[in-house]
Image (tube, rainbow, N blue to C red):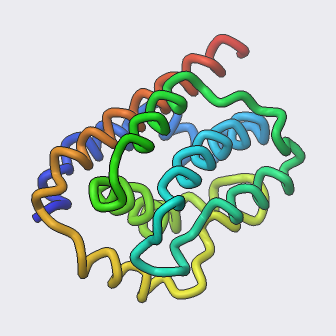
Amino acid sequence: MLKDLIQEKHRQAEQMPFNQRMFRGELSIYEYSTYLQQLEAIFAELEKNPLPHPSLNRTAAIQQDIQELGYNRTIPLLETSKHYTRYLATLSATEQLPHVYLHYMALLFGGQIMKNKIHGNGTLYQFDDAPAAIQAIRTIQQDSWANEANRGLDYFTDILDELYDLFRLHR
């Protein structure tokens, strides 16, 4: 099963210090806004292609959250995020599906825990029809996606690491 095939790297991402701080509700508004800016770039790239369900689209929700927090377009895109989005841009819509699985299922599940730990309304974590969105992804998911999903987790772990380093230097 795909979930089992990416479990090790998923656990590593969950244990990243920046992620742990976010799960404990310790991020400042600026730190969380910077995280959102990175997500916006990733989701904007993934959403250039049709998603398995219309309620999955998150780019507008992320933009709304950033604007609500007062950091509209003032946050730099990290080098690791640039690398990941450039990589995603080289993939076809079909080749991006493991990354769709990775990021959207993360919001649909772990994001539901996260939404109580962040600043603002957390529009990012609010789905019009979460059960149908989950089902749409599960209907198409394949175990053969494991290598590509693990590659996505590697990229995302690098982003979390760069975020942690960035803000560790400012404390």
- Say which of 62 and 126 sits in front: 62
Across and down, in percent, residue 56 comes to 51, 73
Q: Position of residue 169 (x, y in %)?
A: 65, 11
Q: In this view, does 58 lie above or below 149?
A: below
Residue, x 76% and y 65% (percent of image)? Answer: 121
In the rendered structure, the answer to whether residue 28 lies left or right of residue 137 reads: right
Residue situated in front as seen by the camera: 19 or 1? 1
Q: Position of residue 64 (x, y in %)?
A: 78, 61
Q: Which residue lies furthest to the top in this view?
A: 169
Q: Which residue: 28% across, 44% down?
A: 11
Location of the N terminus (image quadrant): bottom left
Total marks drawn?
A: 0
> Which quadrant of the figure contains the C terminus?
top right
Residue sitting at x 52%, y 87%: 129
Residue shown at the point (38%, 34%) measured from the top left: 155
| 97 left or right, relative to 68 | left
Whole-percent x, y for residue 112 in the image: 52, 68
Left-right relation of 142 to 134: left
Quarter of the view holding residue 93: bottom left
**Which residue is outermost to the right?**
70
Q: Is residue 37 above or below residue 94?
A: above
Residue 125 position by quadrant: bottom right
